[in-house]
Amino acid sequence: MADRPDGAAQQGGNRPKLALHVPEPKFRPGDTVDFSHLQIPEAGKQPRPDETCDPKDMHELAFGLVRVLGEDNKAHGPWDPKLDPDTLRKMLGHMAMTRAFDERMFRGQRQGKTSFYMKCTGEEATSVAASMALAADDMVFPSYRQQGILIQRGYPMIEMINQIYSNKGDKLKGRQLPIMYSSREHSFFTISGNLATQTPQAVGWAMASAIKGDSRIAATWVGEGSTAEGDFHSACTFATVYHAPVILNVINNQWAISSFSGFAGAERTTFAARALGYGLAGLRVDGNDALACFAAEQWAANRARANAGPTLIEFFTYRAEGHSTSDDPSGYRSAQERSEWPLGDPITRLKDHLIAIGEWDEARQEKMDLEAAELVKATTKEAEANGILGHGLHHPFRTMFEDVFEELPWHLKEQSEQAIREREIKFPGGLEL
Amino acid sequence: MIEAINDALAVSMERDPNVVVMGEDVGYFGGVFRCTAGLQEKFGKTRVFDTPISECGIIAVAVGMGAYGLRPVPEIQFADYIYPGLDQLISEAARLRYRSAGEYIAPMTVRSPFGGGIFGGQTHSQSPEAIFTHVSGLKTVIPSTPYDAKGLLISAIEDNDPVIFFEPKRIYNGPFSGYYDKPAQPWKKFDASVVPEGYYKIPLGKARLAAEGEQLTILAYGTMVHVVEAVCREKGVEADILDLRTLVPLDIEAIEASVEKTGRCLIVHEATRTSGFGAELSALVTERCFYHLEAPVVRVTGFDTPYPHSLEWAYFPGPVRIGEALDKILSE
Ligand SMILES: Cc1ncc(C[n+]2csc(CCOP(=O)(O)OP(=O)(O)O)c2C)c(N)n1
């Protein structure tokens, strides 16, 4: 072995041999799944401290699991946000719409209409319910699995599909990977493919809002796997140092592509507990309980708005589908995991709650699901009229050189002219300039 | 030059309440080079403040602030420490406008002292400008006089694109002839140190003709402009010395005009040679002015080693290396 002078290796002969620990998930393909090791506390039993409390008094909440919906499908305890039935139905509707959208877009990718898609199946509450707890003009810095926010904020669905198809209606001019939306009008930050970069940016936005004496806060979403990135730790440091009005949402869906959460450190502590070392408020929440998701985000938003500081929320959930259309999870995890997941499905749970309180029924649910599917289908058709990926070049070549800088410098002007010259040879179909 | 930079910051902050200055030690203390001295007192703690030692965080937070509508001017204490913030510069700041089709911009100016000649060792002497010129969407600015530093910095802060503003720290306090054993002269002895009060701008993308001559064209920036001037004076060489001032956008017209006039081109920079910005300049001159050239384009640069502490004067592309190159190019 390297590094040691001759003979030195023997000196440690009596010492115990060191061993490296490489995390391994509990279940692999073919394994029988048993989630009994997960501690799922009873709904309603978690204390709800005042929003302005000291993070030091929140240890328990960083290790526990805030839950509202119980086995009886009723809402329990101090975290019950006491939403009226209309709001609950709206929440359910956005979540169902998100799922219908995912289904159709996934299919579109399989049909070759686009190159790529990412579902958020099983995680709908962490975007929809959480964003319902924010004001419409609070700024969100999402990752790629928060399409629910756009749906909740009423962003036109056709814009989403145009973006996914990179067609001529795509207002991002066909430059971004499908699902990497941007909408300034909806206070939705442009999504980056580089993981976790948005988290310290959200803190910067929140700091700016505070510098200006604004009342808007910022929130960011990041996968549990990505919390291992340095950017996330910069975000936590800046958030706590400047007491920034920001919410750091960590979506712990157990898997980062094929790496289980243990590779981000989950074997040792919770993701919410990361907050404690920074002096941030930390909440660990049942991410499949839409009411708990709403309540936690609302608590954090109230805290931020009251200048009482930032919050890190871990939403404990499960990625029910593959990572993306390029991923086949049957190659690395037990197929049983999804059905055995002890926290159920967020849409089913919210639906059952509405039924339990006498505000909903299966027939209405069926009708709603059908309508959602129909709307997505019709909007897809409409978007297809603008073209699909790979069928024609939808954007004039010169647009490729726009927006690199505010003004086109000489070297890009020259390169743009070249691209236009080449077009006749490469694409004899005759395309617009 | 330090006072000029300080002045540019103060002028910009006075004119635009959205300009904020941040970085390690920049607040109460005024920065390790004192470039931000007095600003916090004048503009308050929410517009001029210290940050954690996290270059990634500093740049990222500036991106978020830019998206909000502020014009952050983050300082990276030494250019050598910009690397932890590189991803935020390369993948985020530089591409925000493009990826959002103009919805979001990052109008920030990252200031950072760069270059060697101050016994700073490997980690306080680097010239990483080429990394940034390689990134689409970033502008790179390098002043060489106090007058330029103020005018260029004000332009950079007002620019809606992210700008890397590298300050040649060897000449913070006065121009430098390139002789390690000759003390630098204080700026106040030179015309270029005369900095008008108040607001003025020098446009990005325009080079400065620092000297005029018929024998050859020398392309340089930062500290090397002064070294080249001194060597030419000493050797009696009459050169067009073009101080590029901004590497992106580059003043290609000025370069072409001068090389077409003189027929010879020498490029001088302090950064390491391989894939340095000199390679880009050399390629451009060869592509565009080939039929006017009477000799091959020559580069004088630092060596392809890290900046060695005790041997920094062996590394530095000083009068000997430049003199040799001049002899070669003029004899062809
Ligand atoms: C900086 C960076 N490294 C690697 C990748 C490739 N990558 C894309 S998604 C992903 C997994 C992310 O997992 P997690 O953060 O848990 O989020 P999830 O996909 O589970 O929602 C990886 C490694 C990337 N996009 N960016």
Image (spheres, coloured by chain):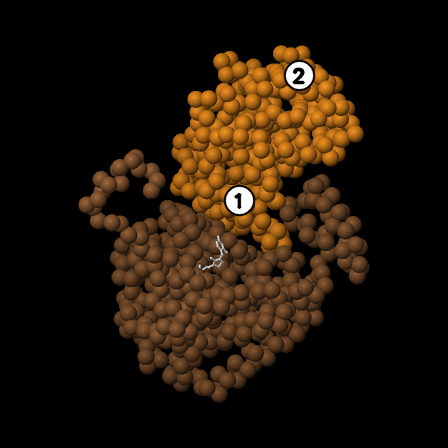
Chain colours: A brown, B orange
Mark 2, secondary structure of its residue: helix
Horizontal and vertical percent position of residue B131? 56, 39
Amino acid type, mark 2: Asp
Residue at coordinates 48% horizontally, 28% vertically from top-left?
B307
Horizontal and vertical percent position of residue A173? 66, 58
Q: Mark 2 points at which residue?
A: B327
Q: In this view, does B295 lie above or below B41?
A: above
Q: Quadrant of the C terminus of chain B?
A: top right
Badge 1 local density, few (<14 within 10 Å), some, or many (20+)? many
Residue A382, label in figure: none
Residue at coordinates 53% horizontally, 71% vertically from top-left?
A102
Residue at coordinates 53% horizontally, 59% vertically from top-left?
A188
Q: Is A324 left, or right, of A236 in this rendering?
A: right
Q: Quadrant of residue A390?
A: bottom right
Horizontal and vertical percent position of residue B158? 60, 39
Residues flagged by tags 1 and 2 on a common chain: yes
- In front: mark 1 or mark 2? 2
Image mark 2: chain = B
Residue A423 visible, this angle: yes
Residue A52 visible, this angle: no
Horizontal and vertical percent position of residue A157? 59, 69
Residue B89, label in figure: 1
Q: In this view, does A387 lie above or below A229?
A: below
Q: Is A265 left, or right, of A382 in this rendering?
A: left
Nearer the observer, A200 or B157: A200
Residue at coordinates 32% horizontally, 72% vertically from top-left?
A35
Amino acid type, mark 1: Leu
Number of numbered markers: 2
Nearer the observer, B326 or B30: B326
Image mark 1: chain = B
Mark 1, secondary structure of its residue: helix
